[in-house]
Image: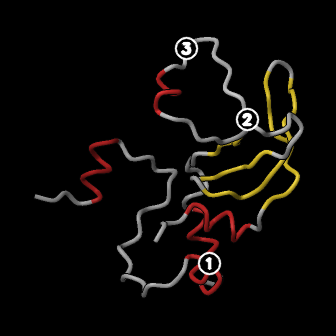
Amino acid sequence: MGASQAEIDALFGADDSLPPHPPPAAPETAQPVSSRHKSAGSSNNADISRVLHLSVPVRVVLAERQMTIESLLAINVGTIIESDVSFDAELALHVANCRVGTGHAVKVGENFGLRVKQIGSVEERIDAMGPRD
């Protein structure tokens, strides 16, 4: 009992400012994401513009360390978890759990931010958001 796209749009009050949904494309042959967007040519710009408004998880990694389960269970409010990372070390910038760049922590008013020192190419950042094999 499937609904058509028009029925779904009517149910949710489709926004006429959005482009209409294209018919489903034939499945692509399996190739890496980087190969797909390099070989797609001018149609790539149209494809990418459809997803530019989507949100993806972006995180800055301060440090990572191994802890025993016993140590984890002993953590309370006020516990300090030490790392062997210097306070001025480069921090990793991740998109969808893939490292795409590095930077240094900065204070912006009352908040912290990341001043990007190195960032991957557009292709590498797009690949970071793609499916994992």
Q: Is residue 9 left or right of residue 107?
A: left
Rendering coords of residue 74 (x, y %) = 51, 19
Q: Nearer the viewer, mark 1 or mark 3?
A: 3
Q: Is residue 108 left or right of residue 68?
A: right
Rendering coords of residue 117 (x, y %) = 88, 52
1 or 2: tag closer to the N-terminus: 1
Query: In the image, which disc is placed on residue 76?
Result: 3
User: Does 100 appear above or below 34?
Assistant: above
1 or 3: tag closer to the N-terminus: 1
**Residue at point 36% right, 73% down?**
23
Inter-mark Cα distance, 1 to 2: 35 Å
Query: In the image, which disc is placed on residue 83?
Result: 2
Q: Disc 1 marks which residue?
A: 34
Report the front residue among 128 and 62: 62
Q: Secondary structure at mark 1?
A: helix
Q: Nearer the viewer, mark 1 or mark 2?
A: 2
Furthest toward the left, the residue is 1
Q: Amino acid at mark 2?
A: Ser
User: Does 58 appear above or below 18?
Assistant: above
Report the front residue among 110 and 51: 110
Q: Is residue 99 left or right of residue 13?
A: right
Rendering coords of residue 22 (x, y %) = 41, 70
Neighbourhood count class around disc 3 (C-alpha, 10 Å): few under 14, some 14–19, many 20 upward = few
